[in-house]
């Protein structure tokens, strides 16, 4: 355990709410160093599916493991409710949630054993607080209230706005009324989300003097103290160091942190291209490394059509299409074929396309491993690694297919002979350092090798990461890269300055637009990259609309209507009857679906109709 006590405590939340727990930790444990991670880019967690939140929490735990944290506090009630037990089983570091400490705080405060819980939708649905409270006191009465509006209000810095007061009243008053009479059903309100203490003043005002309002911060800090002592991890002295990381806009996060701590907090660092795309928490600082695990993030696809349709329908929920990106660093290798681990090659093979991020910026503080900046060389290096990886797969398969051919007959033998013929063409191309996407394959040949998920068969998008000074006129820098990429099929090149875009992302929308205009940038890098990804993969978006939700769906361009319906739900594909279809602009011009039908611009199509980009679908089905 030598030196283990000097390691930091990790604190994880979906956004800024966990800073209230961090504040109490720092007050009670002044000698302890801390690292805070706020996943603002993917908040709020409350409306998400449990599996998503478990995945996000696993990613955070891996991140803290790389930071060598001695203990982790999951300061997010939603993550605690659905992911705590899972990550405790999977990771060796002591991990504490906030729900059981919160339940203990509420039971200490209640006089009538009547507790109301204000929490996110997913926390309420999980029943975690009810179980924790009744584990500690089987006779306690518990009333829960889901509060989906509160976290966004806090994250937007509107905790003291009239909208916040109205939302608090909407959620708290049902717990204060019995039989139509204002008589508190509960005598204690437990703030079951670490964002909610930032609304404490409004909550206490609505609840009145007869209701106590408690949260989990103090009791969580006490629990941390006890666990550190039991594991002999308590730090007895020395200078405590604190670091804040977030995946969203740094400036806003810093401002809220300042309000919580009533002082300038440590500098907030973002965890620049992968984070820009996905809002994930991959650090570019001391904890980054090519040998680290693959980072996974999801990017919302910017689409003004979703916003325009939402303005028409004013739905309860707006859902953009999403693209998953995997951030896979390369180690510096002495020989080709050694820079990507077997695990990372496996991660790559699950992709549909590959984004090569090549460096074209100069930064003396970040020396290039090869001693100079040369994006064309770096592109060639990466391509060679992928060629070697595919060559090894083809070579092994050709060795094994010979005995299989000798023992097979009939259609099975024909299938293997076709596979062998394609693999022989493939190994010849790879030996000439030609990627497999350059090969002309017919549908049967394509099918024969589809299962190998060859890396050089995938489309390639080259993102050239520029100096800020080259953004306005990038052609001089990217022309050689474009020429190199053009030598092979299914390739595209996009210029971007990740550092500049990260800084712009922190500005208010109007200032960001003005700044981009001054620089001659027509759109954010995120939009360019995602649009280029769509074009490379031949993807289109169609929409479903209604009062409940306006949503974008991604399918290959020209997908039959029945297949597109399957993107929504397998039942719609299985029971497909027909689809009512209208272009999104036609729908906006008509003003409503009813008027569109009167005007004759909404039509009915069958199973084989090729769905076009931007169309709105209503699927009629019967299962």
Image (cartoon, grey):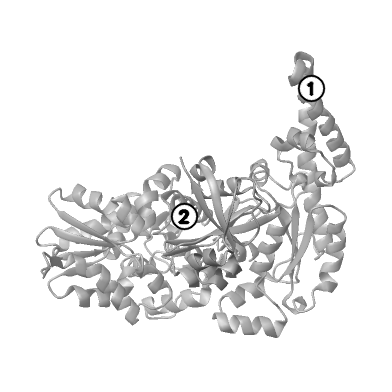
Q: How far from the left and from the top, in percent, is residue 362?
A: 76, 71
Question: Taking 231 as reference, is 491 left or right?
Answer: right
Q: Looking at the image, can residue 406 be seen?
A: yes
Q: Are marks 1 and 2 in contact (CB under 8 Å)?
A: no
Question: Taking 136 as reference, is 296 left or right?
Answer: right
Q: Residues within 10 Å of mark 2 (few under 14, many from 20)?
A: few
Q: Nearer the viewer, mark 1 or mark 2?
A: 1
Question: Taking 252 as reference, is 30 left or right?
Answer: left
Residue bearing mark 1: 414
Residue bearing mark 2: 3
Q: How far from the left and from the top, in percent, is residue 551?
A: 51, 60
User: Residue at left 24%, top 49%?
Assistant: 131
Q: Indicate the quadrant where residue 501 lies.
A: bottom right
User: Residue at left 64%, top 47%?
Assistant: 560
Q: How far from the left and from the top, in percent, is residue 372?
A: 81, 65
Question: Taking 98 as reference, is 594 left or right?
Answer: right
User: Residue at left 43%, top 52%?
Assistant: 49
Q: Indicate the quadrant where residue 104 lies.
A: bottom left
User: Residue at left 18%, top 56%?
Assistant: 142
In this view, the residue in front, 609 or 80, is 609
């Amino acid at each position: 355990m030598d030196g283990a006590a000097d390691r930091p405590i990790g604190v994880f939340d979906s956004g800024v709410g966990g800073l209230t727990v961090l504040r109490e930790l720092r007050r009670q444990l002044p000698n302890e160093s801390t690292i805070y991670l706020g996943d603002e880019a993917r908040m709020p967690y409350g409306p998400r599916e449990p599996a998503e939140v478990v995945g996000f929490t696993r990613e955070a735990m891996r991140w803290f493991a790389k930071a060598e944290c001695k203990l982790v506090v999951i300061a997010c009630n939603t993550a605690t409710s659905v992911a705590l037990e899972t990550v405790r089983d999977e990771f060796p570091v002591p991990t504490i949630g906030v729900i059981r400490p919160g339940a203990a705080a509420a039971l200490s405060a209640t006089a009538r054993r009547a507790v109301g819980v204000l929490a996110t939708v997913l926390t309420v649905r999980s029943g975690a607080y009810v179980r924790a409270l009744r584990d500690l006191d089987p006779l306690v009465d518990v009333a829960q209230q889901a509060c989906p509006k509160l976290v966004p209000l806090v994250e937007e810095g509107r905790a003291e706005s009239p909208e916040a007061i109205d939302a608090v009243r909407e959620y708290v008053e049902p717990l204060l009324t019995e039989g139509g009479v204002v008589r508190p059903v509960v005598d204690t309100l437990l703030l079951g989300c670490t964002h909610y203490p930032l609304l404490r003043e409004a909550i206490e005002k609505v609840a009145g003097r007869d209701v106590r309002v408690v949260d989990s911060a103090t009791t969580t800090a006490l629990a941390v103290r006890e666990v550190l002592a039991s594991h002999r991890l308590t730090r007895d002295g020395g200078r405590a160091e604190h670091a804040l990381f977030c995946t969203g806009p740094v400036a806003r996060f810093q401002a809220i942190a300042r309000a919580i701590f009533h002082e300038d907090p440590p500098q907030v660092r973002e965890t620049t291209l992968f984070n820009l795309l996905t809002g994930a928490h991959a650090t570019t600082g001391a904890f980054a490394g090519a040998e680290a695990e693959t980072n996974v993030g999801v990017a919302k696809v910017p689409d003004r059509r979703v916003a325009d349709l939402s303005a028409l329908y004013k739905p309860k929920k707006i859902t953009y299409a999403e693209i998953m990106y995997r951030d896979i660093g390369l180690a510096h290798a002495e020989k080709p074929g050694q820079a990507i681990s077997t695990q990372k090659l496996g991660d790559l093979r699950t992709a549909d396309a590959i984004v090569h991020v090549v460096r074209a910026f100069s930064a003396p503080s970040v020396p290039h491993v090869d001693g100079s900046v040369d994006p064309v060389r770096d592109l060639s290096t990466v391509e060679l690694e992928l060629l070697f990886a595919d060559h090894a797969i083809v070579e092994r398969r050709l060795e094994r297919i010979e005995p299989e051919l000798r023992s097979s007959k009939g259609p099975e033998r024909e299938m293997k002979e076709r596979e062998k013929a394609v693999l022989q063409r493939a190994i010849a191309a790879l030996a000439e350092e030609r990627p497999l996407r350059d090969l002309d394959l017919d549908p049967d040949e394509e099918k024969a090798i589809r299962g190998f998920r060859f890396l050089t068969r995938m489309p390639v998008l080259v993102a050239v990461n520029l100096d800020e000074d080259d953004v306005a006129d990038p052609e001089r820098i990217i022309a050689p890269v474009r020429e190199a990429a053009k030598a092979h099929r299914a390739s595209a090149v996009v210029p971007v300055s990740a550092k500049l875009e990260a800084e712009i992302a922190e500005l208010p929308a109007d200032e960001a637009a003005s700044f981009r205009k001054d620089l001659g940038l027509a759109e954010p890098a995120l939009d360019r990259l995602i649009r280029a990804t769509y074009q490379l993969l031949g993807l289109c978006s169609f929409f479903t609309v209604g009062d409940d939700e306006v949503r974008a769906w991604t399918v290959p361009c020209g997908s039959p209507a029945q297949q597109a319906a399957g993107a929504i739900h397998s039942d719609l594909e299985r029971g497909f009857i027909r689809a009512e279809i209208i272009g999104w602009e036609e729908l906006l011009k008509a003003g409503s679906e009813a008027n569109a039908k009167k005007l004759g611009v909404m039509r009915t199509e069958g199973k084989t109709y090729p769905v076009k980009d931007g169309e709105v679908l209503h699927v009629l089905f019967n299962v």
